[in-house]
Image (tube, grey):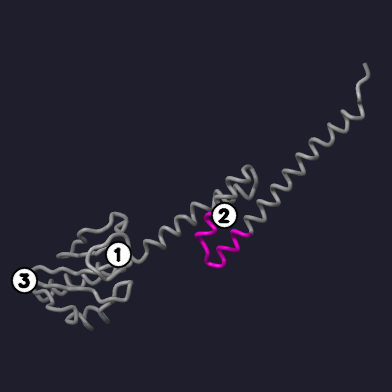
Amino acid sequence: MRKPWPAVCLYAILVPALALHLTACSSYRARREFERAISLERQGRMEEMVVLLKNIEQRYPGTEAARRAARMRPLYEGLLTARARFPVRRAVDILRQVAGEVERHRELSGTLPRALAELVPSELPAIPDDPWGRELRYECRGDHYRLSSLGSDGEPGGSGEAMDLFIQDGLLTPGPSWAER
C-alpha cells in the first residue's frame, strides 16, 4: 500500500502553520484590545478599562496581553475602590484634624470652645467643610463635645458615602472599619 506522502507532508506543514497563524491572530487581537483598554484609562474611564482587562484575561489566555492585563487589573480595581472611599476617608481626616484642635484648645484653656469659630484663626486658619461642601456640626455640653459630618447626602442616617461620621470627645464613633486603615 502506498502512502500519500504529498498529502502527509502538506498536512504536516499546514497544521502547525495554521496553529501559528491562529495564535498570532489571537495575540494580535489581544494586543489591540489591551491598547484599547489603555486608551480608556487615558480618557478617565477606569471602570470600563477594568472590565476590558478582565475580558482580555478570559478570552486570550496565554498571550502577553492577558499576562499584562492580569498584572494591571488588580491595581486599577484597587484605585477604583480607593476613589469610591476617598470622600469618607477625607471626612474622617478633617474630623480628626478639627477634633485635635478642639482637644488642644481644651488643654491650653481648660475649657472646650463653645463654637468652632473660637478656634479661628489661633488654632485653625478657617473652619473646614466636609468633602461634600457642608459645614461640620459641633455640639458642646459641659465637658463633652461631639463633632460630626452627615455624609454625602447631608441627612441624618445613611450608609456608605452617606454614612454619618462622629467624633465624640476625641474618639471616632462609630465609623466604617476601612475608614481607619
- Place of residue 91 in the rendered image (x, y in percent of width and height, measured from the top left): 30, 67
Check whether the beta carbons of the residues at disc 3 and disc 2 lie within 8 A of each other.
no
* Residue count near mark 2 (Cα–Cα under 10 Å), binned few <14, some 14–19, many ≥20: many
Q: Which mark is residue 52?
A: 2
Q: Is residue 178 left or right of residue 100?
A: right
Task: Pick whichever of labels 3 and 2 is earlier in the sequence.
Answer: 2
Q: CA distance from mark 3 to mark 2?
A: 57 Å
Asked if residue 177 is among those painted magenta in the image, a careful observer would answer no
Residue at image location 10% in from the left, 76% down from the top:
109
User: Magenta stretch containing residue 39, yes or no?
Assistant: yes
Report x, y in % for residue 24.
74, 46
The quadrant where residue 145 appears: bottom left
Q: Amino acid at mark 2?
A: Leu
The span picked out in magenta is: 36-53
Q: Position of residue 158 (x, y in %)?
A: 26, 62
At numbered mark 3, what does the secondary structure look like: helix, strand or loop?
A: loop
In the orientation shown, which residue stands out farthest toward the top? 1
The picture quadrant where one finds residue 1 is top right
Disc 3 versus disc 2: nearer the observer: 2
The disc at residue 142 is 3
Q: Is residue 131 above or below residue 83?
A: below
Residue 107: give its label: none
**Residue annotated with mark 1:** 162
